[in-house]
Amino acid sequence: MSDDARTTLAQEQARLVAALSGRAGPTAGFDPARIDLSARTLFAKRRKGVRRAFPVLADSPAETFDQHFAAFARTSPPAPAGPGADGFAFARWLDAGGLLPT
């Protein structure tokens, strides 16, 4: 595979990952409804993982947790180290915004 082809493939993959993580719209060549469904499913899985890893963060009313986590997730990609690291990043985000539950 040529360097140009690798670069193009990497850019397309980055756009797909951004779409699946809810940080961008659907990419050309993919069914927008399926991308949306997959993005919502991955978001729910991510949110559930953070709830399990950091139950104290989920002690706030569910809709508040969900709204705050959705705002966090729109600007922060999932932590490669998993839900524990993602939950820690979410806690830091909440703290920086003065939103950490007491």
Image (cartoon, rainbow, N blue to C red):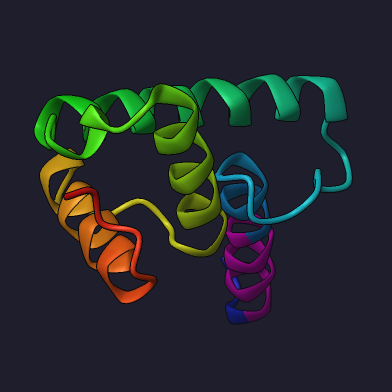
Question: Does residue 39 appear to the left or right of 70 in the view shown?
Answer: right
> Which x, y percent locates residue 4?
67, 79
Q: Pick the residue in front: 81 or 71.
A: 71
Toward the viewer: 4 or 67? 67
x, y percentage for residue 32?
A: 85, 30
> Residue 37 lies in magenta, yes or no?
no
**Extreme bottom residue here?**
3
The one of 68 and 89 positioned closer to us in this rendering: 68
- As drawn, 99 above or below 96: above
Q: Residue at x 32, y 61 (%)?
A: 94
| Residue 65: quadrant of the picture | top left
Q: Is residue 96 above or below residue 87?
A: below
Which residue appears at 13% of the width and 29% of the height? 55
Front position in the image: 83 or 91? 91
Q: What's the residue at 61%, 54% (across, down)? A: 18
Name which residue lies at 64% across and 55% down.
Answer: 23
What secondary structure prevails in the magenta region? helix
Q: Could you tell me residue 7's position as x and y percent?
A: 61, 75
Residue 31 visible in rendering: no
The answer to whether any part of residue 6 appears in the image is yes
Q: Quadrant of the N terminus?
A: bottom right
Q: Verify whether residue 5 appears in magenta.
A: yes
Q: Which residues are magenta?
A: 4-14
Q: Is residue 10 above or below residue 30?
A: below
